Structures are given as C-alpha cells and as structure tokens.
Amino acid sequence: MAKEEEPTSSPMHPSSSYTFLLNIMSKRRTWACLFLFVYGTLLASSWNFLKSTLSWYNLQVQSSTSAWPALYASVLLGTVFGLLSMVAALVVMVPAVMVTWITVVVLLAFFGKPRRTLVVEGRKITGEIFGVVVRILLKEGNFVAAVCAVLGYFALVRRNRTQEGVVGES
C-alpha cells in the first residue's frame, strides 16, 4: 500500500510567495529603489522640519528683539542635519565594514590559521573595525552639526537684520 503524499510546504520546498520574495530582494534594483525611497522620505521630512522651524523662528522674532531665537533655531537645525548625515553615513558604512571584515577573515584563513583562532581573531577585528568606524561617524556628524548650526545662525541673524531694514524704510 503506497500512501499518496500530500503537497505540503516543508523546509525542503519553500512556498512560492517566499521564493518570490527572495527573488525580488536579491535584485540590486530593489535595494536601490528602497535606498532612494528611504532617502526621499528623510529629505521630505527634513524639509518639512526646516519649514516648521523657520515659521517658529519668524513668530519668535516678531515678539522678541534678542538673538536667542536664532541661536535656538540654528542649534536645533544643526543637530537634526548632523543626525541625518550620521544616518546617511551609517547606511553606507555597514556594507563597507562587512566587506572589510570578510576580507580580513579570508586572508587569515589563507595564512593557515585554525578555525578557533579565526573566530577569536574575527571577534577582535569586528570590535576594532566597529570602534574606529563609530569614532569617525561621530566626528563627521558633529562636524556637520557644528557647520550647520553656525551657518544657520548667521543666515537667520542676517535675514532678521534685512527684514528689520525693510520694515524700517516703510
């Protein structure tokens, strides 16, 4: 008596939707579109944030004559754009770190290191690479934040002075 096998989805035969998803996600075009979508969303949200910060600044300038609103707005804008630059660098950093790590481990394997040594060395190398990359990432993000804050402050103060000059002439 032969039993008829029912078609079931087993670990050996993945479902068609799973295969379709793997096929789509393995394409470079899919990742490029996903990358562009994420950066487009970040750009649109940062543009809306910039507009809302400037409208808050304009309201504060009308009720105050001090330079504090310009300082607050510029520090806020610098912080946000510094964080955005760190996120952008992080997205580029992850594949670069992985390629570097794989290259070093493969080179160690070619030099005849045993597997246990490769695991220990791989962990050390991962920690070192991650530490160096995070330090660079923080330096770059802080630099971008500082530049954006300083430029934003001077742009807002200059804008405020030109608006006062136009109002004074009327």
Image (tube, rainbow, N blue to C red):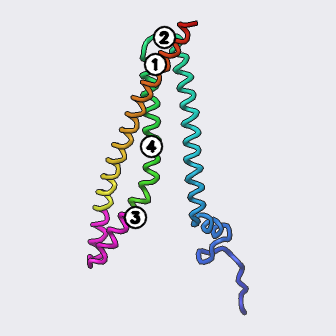
Q: Earlier in the sequence, mark 4 or mark 3?
A: 4
Residue, disc 2? 64
Q: What span is colored magenta in the figure?
A: 99-123
Q: Earlier in the sequence, mark 3 or mark 2?
A: 2
Q: Quadrant of the N terminus?
A: bottom right
Q: Are marks 4 and 2 in contact (CB under 8 Å)?
A: no
Quarter the C terminus occupies: top right
Residue reaching furthest to the front: 169
The kind of residue tagged 3 is: Val
The earlier-in-sequence mark between 2 and 1 is 2
**Disc 3, SS:** helix
The residue tagged 1 is 69
Which dot marks residue 85?
4
Residue 28 marker: none
- Specify the label residue 99 is tagged with: 3
Q: Amino acid at mark 1?
A: Pro
